[in-house]
């Protein structure tokens, strides 16, 4: 009974106090720095009681309108969930650029299927992009053995002064942090990547299979990561922001600010990766 009452209350709040439409959402995006021409990378979770008056496709359309035809909208589209990239590659399943669904949430999958969206040819971390120079932004992802390394599209987010946005998705979902880790790999006390690359397969837009060598994050690096220290530093510096519209929680930061803040933390300490000890 209590649970039913809570659900009814959330339903009412979503239709009234929390309610907002696509135009209000775009105004909110403008207030945090999203202008026509912006490069915006979004991580999103679709919540039933967010207050948004529309469907996932309505949200995707609003995001496209916010950056405009001269901007770029980017999302992740990894074809696996709740497993590591090493576990995914061990399955031996190809990433089919046309057919493999995005397992990064409903909004990401709706975006993947929407008009004008391109997908990069990465076996483990394919990106989606819509807008100006989308194909150029995603180009050559298949030619690097480090899917979020310096030769990947993730590096171009810094060059484009991209804004990273979590839409009901916490900072922990920001895949760009792996690019940051790649750039700081020589400051870690353990190898960031496994010593040898794994094999992965991509099926391109023409249906042709391509085998890729892919370096995956080491189990030890994953175990020693202390992301909360990085979050605390970014908040202290004022570069990591949080807000809300309706019952939707927003988290945002510039890609360059995240990289710069992480570099300062790695230099000044304490690092956001621990050193191995007999007890950890």
Image (spheres, grey):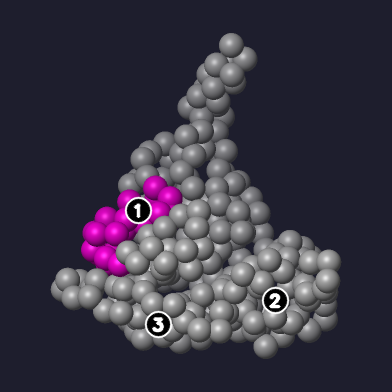
Residue under label 3: 213
Span of residues in magenta: 94-118
> Earlier along the polypeptide chain: callout 1 or callout 3?
1
Q: Is residue 211 visible?
A: yes
- The answer to whether residue 131 is above or below residue 115 is below
Residue at image point 31% right, 73% down: 201
> Earlier along the polypeptide chain: callout 2 or callout 3?
3
Binning the other alpha carbons within 10 Å of mark 2 as few (below 14), some (14 to 19) or many (20 upward) gives many
Count of marks overlaid on the render? 3
Q: CA distance from mark 1 to mark 3?
A: 26 Å
Residue under label 1: 109
Residue at image point 24% right, 71% down: 203
Which type of secondary structure does the marked residue at label 3 adopt?
Answer: strand
Residue extending farthest to the left is 206
> Earlier along the polypeptide chain: callout 2 or callout 1?
1
Q: CA distance from mark 2 to mark 3?
A: 28 Å
Where residue 197 sits in the image (x, y, percent)? Answer: 47, 82
**Residue 238, quarter of picture:** bottom right
Residue under label 2: 262
Where residue 138 sits in the image (x, y, percent)? Answer: 35, 77
Q: Which mark is residue 230?
A: none
Where residue 92 sits in the image (x, y, percent)? Answer: 35, 67
């Amino acid at each position: 009974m209590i649970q039913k009452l809570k659900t009814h209350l959330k339903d009412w709040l979503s239709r009234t106090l929390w309610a907002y439409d696509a135009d209000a959402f775009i105004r909110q995006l403008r207030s945090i720095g999203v202008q026509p021409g912006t490069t915006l990378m979004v991580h999103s979770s679709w919540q039933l009681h967010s207050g948004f008056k529309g469907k996932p496709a309505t949200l995707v359309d609003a995001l496209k309108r916010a950056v405009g035809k001269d901007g770029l909208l980017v999302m992740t589209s990894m074809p696996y969930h709740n497993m590591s990239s090493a576990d995914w590659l061990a399955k031996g399943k190809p990433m089919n650029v046309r057919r493999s669904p995005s397992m990064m949430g409903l909004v990401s999958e709706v975006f993947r299927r929407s008009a004008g969206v391109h997908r990069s040819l990465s076996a483990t971390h394919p990106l989606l992009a819509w807008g100006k120079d989308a194909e150029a932004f995603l180009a050559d992802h298949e030619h690097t053995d480090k899917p979020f390394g310096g030769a990947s599209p993730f590096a171009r987010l810094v060059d484009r002064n991209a804004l990273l946005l979590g839409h009901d998705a916490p900072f922990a979902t920001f895949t760009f942090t792996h690019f940051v880790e790649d750039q700081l790999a020589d400051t870690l006390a353990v190898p960031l990547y496994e010593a040898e690359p794994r094999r992965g397969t991509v099926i391109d837009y023409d249906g042709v299979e391509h085998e890729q060598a892919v370096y995956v994050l080491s189990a030890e690096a994953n175990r020693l990561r202390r992301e909360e220290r990085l979050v605390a530093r970014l908040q202290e510096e004022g570069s990591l922001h949080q807000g809300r519209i309706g019952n939707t929680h927003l988290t945002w930061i510039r890609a360059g600010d995240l990289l710069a803040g992480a570099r300062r933390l790695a230099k000044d300490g304490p690092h956001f990766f621990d050193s191995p000890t007999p007890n950890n």
